[in-house]
Every structure is written in structure tokens, then in C-alpha cells.
Amino acid sequence: MTTTVNEAQLLTSLKTHFGYDRFRGDQQRIIENVLEGKDTLVIMPTGGGKSICFQLPATLFKGVTLVISPLIALMKDQVDGLKANGIKAAFYNSSQDSTEQQGIIDDILNAKLKLIYVAPESLPGLENILNATYISCIAIDEAHCISSWGHDFRPSYQQLGFLKKMLPDIPIIALTATADKATRQDIIEQLKVPHADQFISSFDRENIELEVRPADGRASQIVRFIKQHANESGIVYCLSRKNTETIAKKLNENGINSDAYHAGLSFDDRTRVQEDFIFDKTQVVCATVAFGMGIDKSNVRWVIHHNMPKNIEGYYQEIGRSGRDGLKANALLFHSYADVIQLRKFASGASNEDVQIAKLERMKQFSEATTCRRKILLSYFGELLEENCGNCDVCKNPPKFFDGTVIAQKILSTIKRVKEQEATGTIIDVLRGARNANILEKALDKTKTFGIGHDTSWKDWQQYTIQLINQGICEIAFHKNNALQLTAFSNKVLFNNLKVFLTAPIEYKEPVKTATRTAKPKRTPSNSLFERLRKLRYKISLEENIPAYLVFSDASLKEMEQIRPMSADEFLTISGVGQRKLEVYGDEFIAEILDFMGSKIKKPKKTETHLVTYELYKSGLSIDAISEQRKLKAPTIYSHIAKLYSDGKDINIYDFIAKSDVEAVHQAKIELNNPKTLKEYFDYFNEQMDYFKIRLALSVIDKQD
């Protein structure tokens, strides 16, 4: 099934529906490939624009695009975003009753939908429309879920190979942010698309600053970090349910609006936490990895890992949930050997234990790196970075090495003298001369090296030992109660004077507060244009009951702050502003910008722009003529007409709206119990009545009341 369009048509569709003037990376090539009816595999980082690769073709195909998605929350989020852009979409899943499900099927049969989202488990309910008469394209989102080599394997995805057999001429596009070579091959084989064209985008998210810190006092460090990022949304990932609740409690005690999320909560509680976060009512969510895949929130500014993730794929996907809008974001990871030991226990006995352990080892190497972290991250996915990134903690603060041979010899000698039977903590206790129960019970205070390191702190010895493990100079025997053991390099250090170079331990301390100078976090000025636009966006999101970022992203607001558009045409040049969003939100945002400008420029007041329209109306010009003369879109002129009529101006309102439409809106107002937002009316009419008509009708009804 092929749909022929030229580049100009693609760009027009991109701007009209999504508000962008140009494609990013391989987006255009991918979209053209899909429209040509070719099977396609897309590997593109979170925030790279994967969704447009199937959503834009869907607007051009004759039939509906079937989107396979793993989570209800993810479906709802994407459908809300599509509707906000004026694209007809729906989801079909087990949360709906039979009447609602049948209504969706009827909409597909009557060609009223462009995209339908469904989980693999719910596909049988769509059996009647799974044919080429109705389906033009199939998109498999989060395609890594099909592979047992992937980090988030879901058995329900493995049934999807039947789609190609059932619909051999329908193009399939599979998309994911994280898939190594083995996972990519598995996706292609299981979906039965052996000749799929592969598009592998750069994995480099340059806007995300990478940082790893030792886990000492991490709760206090997290509090300080968040206070330095006031009003910014973020996620704290934790390894256990208990930690999510403990950290959330500590944050709330420090005045940071937080909530915990984990699989132990009821469905209703999980839904509440997620929606409060999406709607900017909660600043921080402390969560297990059960949280996040369904979050398409573009204004997450940072992600913290309280514990080390079990593999690089999971880490990469989780940090990718920050900075989706392309603005600066932060990824902070806390690392400890206790995490490594715990994750090894989790992997023990798994069917793919060897694979999990190998991936954990790569994650550990990343965490303990003394070279550019982005280079390590990208190389894992087969992408080479020639220069250091300059946006990770190693690049910004390169470690300083010193000759640590004597330190290494003390550690190795102690390991040898306790017969390689003790774990790291005990080795350090011997070095420091501790006389605790464990040491005395085992008579380790008689060891020749007992107390030779009393002048070095416990934490420093711990970091030195970790560095020796990383260099292969000693190792942990996980199957022997985590005992430290010697390696082939050990004797060279002990007896052949092999040099060992270590880095000075890093310690993070709370800033010292003094009476004369107190460090304050950087804050966005409360009356900056960005903040005013952000507050307006939040108000609209509450009125329309949609997430704030679906109104406009932070990136769009930043561009508005910089360019300060003061007309409809200027507003339409903002990235993320399409025709639909101009019509629905343009007036309010332009008015806010004009109001902010105040006396800085000579500008008409908001009421004056309506009066200009009124003078042209009285001169006998049509709406189209007024629109052309004023260089404003017709819906904006209609909003002026509604305002003028409400203000008592001499307007023949029924020249612009039928009495039957007014009666229909009046009936909707009664049935909906006087709703506060236009969107509720819009939904009531199944998106068949334009917003400007609803505004005009309400102006008539309000005047009659």
C-alpha cells in the first residue's frame, strides 16, 4: 500500500498538525519509507521524535493506523496529544466498557479515526477491522518488548508476528529507543519483516548532562540538588518500594512536593500519582522502574537514580525521560557496591543470568569510569564519539591520579593474610584497626596488617578498594559471600613493584551556611515572560483537563519569550504552534505577551484589536476580507465578533452562526452542567463543531441568560 506525496506536502502536514517547520534527523526519510509501503525498523532516542514517524503518515493514509502500545497510560497520553493537535485518534483497551469499545469500532468502520492505539492483549477485540479495507499501516511502539534480549521483555508482544501474515501488504513500522544489535535482529525476526529498512539515529542526547556520584549521604544530596532546581519536574528512581517512600517523605519534609510510586500501590493510587505529575501538580515522583514508560511529559528537567540500574539500556531509557523538549536536562546517578551486590542477587537463577550479569558489569564500568561517560554510553550502542562530550562530570572535572602503589599493597596484603575469605568491609576494618565483634571473634586483630591504615577514613579505603577491583587488581567472589580475592595482577603489585595509579576520593558536602553569605538556588524570576506564559499554560491545562505540556512545551514557551510574537502570523512561526493550536490558544498567549510588554512598546490594548475588527465589520467587509486585511486567521476574527457581541456592539450574530447550532450548544450546556471549558463542548459534539462556533453560540446564550 503506497501513498504518494511530495516534500512540500510533508512539510505542510508537519506544520499544520505538529507545529514544526522542519524535520529532525532521519524523520523525513523514515516517513517517506512508510508512505512507500515499506517495512521499517526505527531506533531513535527518547525525545528524538519517534512518534511523528508514524503519526504524520497516519494523517495522509486513507485508512487507520493501528498502533501497538504496551501501557494504557502511554496510549492515553499520545491520544490526548494527537487530539490537541487536531488529529482524530482513540485507544481501545480493557478499561473501556463494551458500549465505548463498539463506538470506537464504528468510528473505524466509518473512517472517522486516523490512529487507533491498542495493547497486544486487546487485539482480538479488533478482529473485524484487521484487514486491508480499514488498516493502512501498523506501528509497533516500544518494540524492544518483543525480545528476551531486551531490558523490558513482555511475552504478550511475541504474538505480534501474526500481523504480517494476516496483512502482508500493509507496512509495519517498529520503533524503540533502546535496542542493541541482538535485540534489533530479534525484533525483525519475530515481527516477520526480514527485509525491513533500518534507521538507527544517533543515541547522543547532548542536552542531558551526565553525572555519577558516590552514594554517601545520597538522601541529603538529592534534597540539595532538587532545591537548586526549583519548580523543575523530575523523577527519582529507586531500587525498592521502601526507598521510594523514604525519599518522598524526606523531600516533603524539606518542602519539596513529592510522591512515591511503586507496584505495591493500588491502581487508583498509581493513577493519581501519575496524573498529578503529568499535570504539574506534583514536582517530584520517587519511583521504581514501574514508572515512566507511559510518561510522555516533555518538561521533565532531571532524572536521579538513587540506585544503580541493572543495565545500560534501562539507564539510557530512564534518563531519556528528561529533556524531551531539547532544553537542558540533568541525569544524576548514585553508585555503590551494595547496589551491584543486590542486583547480582536479583539476576541469580534467571533463565538468562549470564546475559543479565554481563549487562550489569557494563553498567558498573560506566558508573566507575574515569573517562568521558558519553563516549562509554554511546559505544555501548555501537556509536563512536570522536571528541569528549564536555557535558559530563568526568569532562568537567577530570580526575587527578596519584601513585597509589603503597595503598594498593596494604589492601592486597590484608586480603592475602586473611586467606581471601573476607568481604570489603572486614578488610577495611582490619586496615583501620577496628575492634568490633566480627574482628575479635575471628581473631583478625592478630593479623600483621591490623591497624596499618588507621589514619585513612573508612570511606576513603572503600573507594580505593573499589578502584583496585575496577582495575582488575583484586576481585569480588560473589559466590563466596562477596569475599575479596587476589588476581594475576596482585603479585605484580605486591612483589614486582607494578605501579598502581588511583584517584583521590570525592566527597560531597553540604554548603556551609554563614551569617554573611548564604548560597541560594538559582530561580527563574517569578514575573519573567516565561513564568507568566507557564502560569497561563497551567491555567489552560486545568480548564481543559489536559497536561500542561500538551498545550505547549517548555521549548515553545522559551521561544515565545525570545521572539515575543504579537500577531497570529508571528505566533504561527513558533516551533510547536500548528494551525489548531493557533486557533485555540493564540489569542490568550498573544494577549499575555502584549500585556507583559507593557510600556516597553507602543501597542494596542486587547480591547482595541477587537474594535479594529468592528470598524472593518461595519464597513461591510466579510470575515475573509477582514482576516486578509488584518493578517489574522479567520478563527481569531470570529473570536473578536463573539467578544464584540457580548460587549453590546451592533453585531448581526446570526450572520455567523445558525440558530440550530446555538440551540445545540445550549442543550449541551444543560447536559454538561455548565462546563467551564470549550474542550468539554468540543468533545460533546464528537469534535464535529469548531471551537469558534462554540464561542459564538456561548456569547449568544450568555446574553440571553
Image (tube, rainbow, N blue to C red):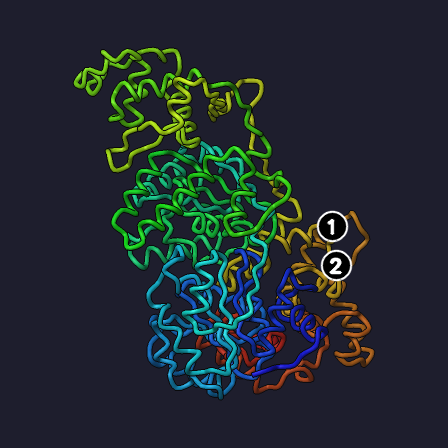
- Residue 535, above or below 645: above
Q: Do tag 2 and tag 1 residues touch (Cβ < 8 Å)?
A: yes
Residue 655 relative to residue 468: left or right? right
At numbered mark 1, what does the secondary structure look like: helix, strand or loop? helix
Nearer the N terminus, badge 2 or badge 1?
2
Q: Can residue 228 be seen in this view?
A: yes
Return the residue nearer the eye: 173 or 695: 173
Neighbour tally class for label 1: few under 14, some 14-19, many 20 plus, Cα within 10 Å: some
Given the current orientation, which residue lies at the most extreme front position? 496
**Residue 630 location in percent, x, y?**
80, 70
Residue 178 relative to residue 523: left or right? left
Please identify the quarter of the rendering in which residue 241 is found: top left
| Quadrant containing the N terminus in the rendered view | bottom right
Q: Is residue 669 visible?
A: no
On residue 566, the disc is: 2
Please identify the quarter of the rendering in which residue 651 is found: bottom right
Which amino acid is tagged 1? Met
For label 1, the residue is 597
Name which residue lies at 83% across and 78% down: 619
Name which residue lies at 66% across and 48% down: 529
| Quadrant containing the C terminus in the rendered view | bottom right
- Residue 311, above or below 681: above
Q: Nearer the viewer, mark 2 or mark 1?
A: 2
Which amino acid is tagged 2? Met
**Residue 665 location in percent, x, y?**
53, 79
Please identify the quarter of the rendering in which residue 644 is found: bottom right
On residue 386, the disc is: none
Return the residue nearer the eye: 112 or 611: 112
Name which residue lies at 35% across and 74% down: 122
- Residue 428, above or below 354: above
At numbered mark 2, what does the secondary structure look like: helix, strand or loop? loop
- Residue 559, above or below 189: above
